[in-house]
Image (cartoon, rainbow, N blue to C red):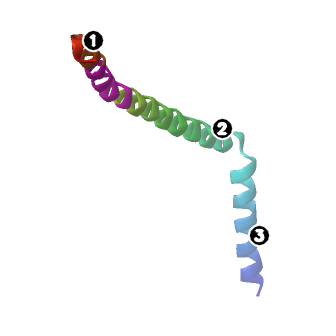
Amino acid sequence: MSERLLLIECIYKYIMDLTSNGVVVTDAIKYVQGKMDHLNGREKALLQDIKQKEEPSENLQEEETTNGVF
């Protein structure tokens, strides 16, 4: 029984160290922020690609109407 209590105590100390250690918390925040920045960059790139794909079709429509068809 006392072995279990020692194990629980050891685990509890380890968990407390991980959650209260500033370096671990700071590293976790930096990791998450880096992932968010990466995803935001990918989102911006995808939106730019979509806009570039839409622009030629808009220009074609303008040319058709200005060439005397309308």
Residue 54 among those drawn in magenta: yes
| Quarter of the rendering occupied by the C terminus | top left
The residue where tag 2 is placed is: 26
Choose top left, top right, bottom left or bottom right for residue 5: bottom right
**Which secondary structure, mark 1?**
helix
Q: Is residue 50 left or right of residue 70?
A: right
* First in sequence: mark 3 vs mark 1: 3
Q: Are marks 3 and 1 in contact (CB under 8 Å)?
A: no
The residue where tag 3 is placed is: 9
**For the point 42% across and 31% down, which residue is it?**
47
Magenta residue span: 50-61
Q: Pinpoint residue 10: horizontal percent, then vertical percent.
A: 72, 67
- In the image, residue 30 sits, relative to residue 18, either above or below, namely above
Eye-nearest disc, 3 or 1: 1
The residue where tag 1 is placed is: 66
**Which secondary structure, mark 2?**
helix
Q: Residues within 10 Å of mark 1 (few under 14, many from 20)?
A: few
Q: In the image, what residue type sits under mark 3?
A: Glu
